[in-house]
Amino acid sequence: MHSSRGVIRSVDGGPVRLSPRQREVLAWSAAGKTTWETPVIIKCTEATVNYHLRQVIRKLEATNKTHAVSRALHLGLIS
């Protein structure tokens, strides 16, 4: 992945895409929910939430969950 002009692109040069579940988990994080609260809301395991967050952090080239939320908001991936 690489960044140019503020757009994060995947290895193939296209824009980064998040799955619906990745966006959902990230949106709950943006709303202040913890990785313990989120699986209760979306009815999955905490391990699943952590997996999706790790994938989002990797895709957005973020350093942590907060950074990923900030980048996703800036890029319009979540609102």
Image: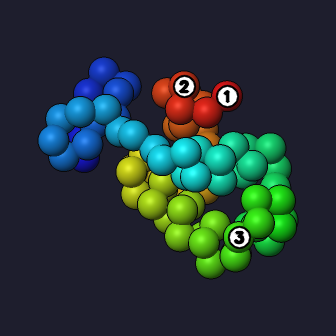
| Inter-mark Cα distance, 1 to 3 | 22 Å
Residue 54 numbered tag: none
Can you identify the residue that label 2 sits on?
Answer: 76
> Dot 2: what SS?
loop
> Dot 1: what SS?
loop
Residue at x-position 65% and y-position 47%: 24
Residue closest to the eye, 10 or 74: 10
Three-letter residue code for mark 3:
Cys
Can you identify the residue that label 1 sits on?
Answer: 79
Residue at x-position 30% and y-position 21%: 5
Whether label 1 touches label 3, CB < 8 Å: no
Residue at x-position 28% and y-position 36%: 9
Which badge, 1 or 3, is on the more N-terminal residue?
3
Residue at x-position 55% and y-position 52%: 22
Vertical placement of 54 versus 79: above or below?
Answer: below
Three-letter residue code for mark 1:
Ser
Can you identify the residue that label 3 sits on?
Answer: 44
- Quadrant of the image occupied by residue 64: bottom right
Residue density around tag 2, few if under 14, some if 14–19, many if 20 or more, within 10 Å: few
Q: Is residue 26 visible?
A: no
Q: Where in the figure is residue 39, as x and y percent of width and height?
A: 76, 67
| Inter-mark Cα distance, 2 to 1 | 6 Å
Residue density around tag 1, few if under 14, some if 14–19, many if 20 or more, within 10 Å: few
Furthest residue toward front: 43
- Quadrant of the image occupied by residue 73: top right
Q: Along the horizontal axis of the image, is 18 left or right of 44?
A: left
Furthest residue toward top: 5
Q: Where in the figure is residue 21, as x and y percent of width and height?
A: 58, 52
| Inter-mark Cα distance, 2 to 3 | 25 Å
Q: Where in the figure is residue 11, as x and y percent of width and height?
A: 19, 46
Residue closest to the eye, 38 or 8: 38
Vertical placement of 75 versus 36: above or below?
Answer: above
